[in-house]
Image (tube, helix red, strand yellow):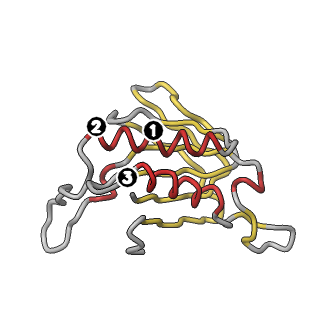
Amino acid sequence: MRAVLQRVSKARVLVDGRVTGEIGKGLVALIAVGRGDTAEMAVSIAEKVLRLRIFDDDQGKMNLSLLDVHGALLAVSQFTLYGDARGQRRPSFIQAAPPDLGKSLYEKFVESARALGVPVETGVFQAHMSLDLTNDGPVTILLDSDKLF
């Protein structure tokens, strides 16, 4: 699985002009599922996202997690994180999971985050979405279950 995390002061996702998810202080997580991913990976990435210390403490150091600051999570599926454009102009998405696996593991990620007590809002799987956010910092972190970065 891959995730792009952005620390935000607010964010919302729209489908066909309708807000499907909206948060205040927290994280936007763009989530992609790879062909070989498992439910265990979805749980592990969810825990990593929620426990990653990327919020400022009283001294301005990034020592607090989303759980510590009682923030919210906006989870948006984005298979294009598996786009491979090495040596070509049109990205290949062959490493992205097929839709049924992608949806199942994306939903497992969301379920796992909610189970840890974080308010989670979402986009709509396989929909064309518009994402509005105010990046706080800016802080953007990349995660990969294969630890490629």
Indicate the position of residue 39 as horizontal and vertical percent values.
Answer: 42, 48
User: Quick one: label 1 or label 3, which is nearer the N terminus?
Assistant: 3
Residue type indicated by callout 1:
Glu
Q: Find residue 74 and report its image quarter.
A: top right
Residue occupying the point 56% across, 58% down: 6
User: Quick one: label 2 or label 3, which is nearer the N terminus?
Assistant: 3
Residue occupying the point 58% across, 58% down: 49
Instruction: Looking at the picture, tell me which residue is in the foreground, 118 or 121.
Output: 118
Indicate the position of residue 30 as horizontal and vertical percent values.
Answer: 45, 51
Which quarter of the rendered picture does the C terminus lie within?
Answer: bottom left
Q: How crowded is mark 3: few (under 14 residues within 10 Å), some or many (20 or more)?
A: some
- Tags 2 and 1 touching, CB below 8 Å: no
Gap between marks 1 and 3 measured at Cα: 12 Å
Q: Name the residue under label 2.
A: 100
Q: Is residue 42 left or right of residue 111?
A: left
Gap between marks 2 and 1 measured at Cα: 11 Å
Residue type indicated by callout 3:
Thr
Q: Which SS class for mark 2?
A: helix
Residue type indicated by callout 2:
Asp
Label number found at residue 107: 1
Q: Name the residue under label 3.
A: 38
Indicate the position of residue 75 as horizontal and vertical percent values.
Answer: 51, 44
Indicate the position of residue 136 as horizontal and vertical percent values.
Answer: 65, 59
Find the residue positioned furthest to the right. 58
Which quarter of the rendered picture does the N terminus lie within?
Answer: bottom left
Q: Which SS class for mark 1?
A: helix
Q: Find residue 77 and report its image quarter.
A: top left
Q: Residues within 10 Å of mark 1 (few under 14, many from 20)?
A: some
Residue occupying the point 63% across, 64% down: 52
Q: Which SS class for mark 3?
A: loop
Q: Find residue 35 and report its image quarter.
A: bottom left
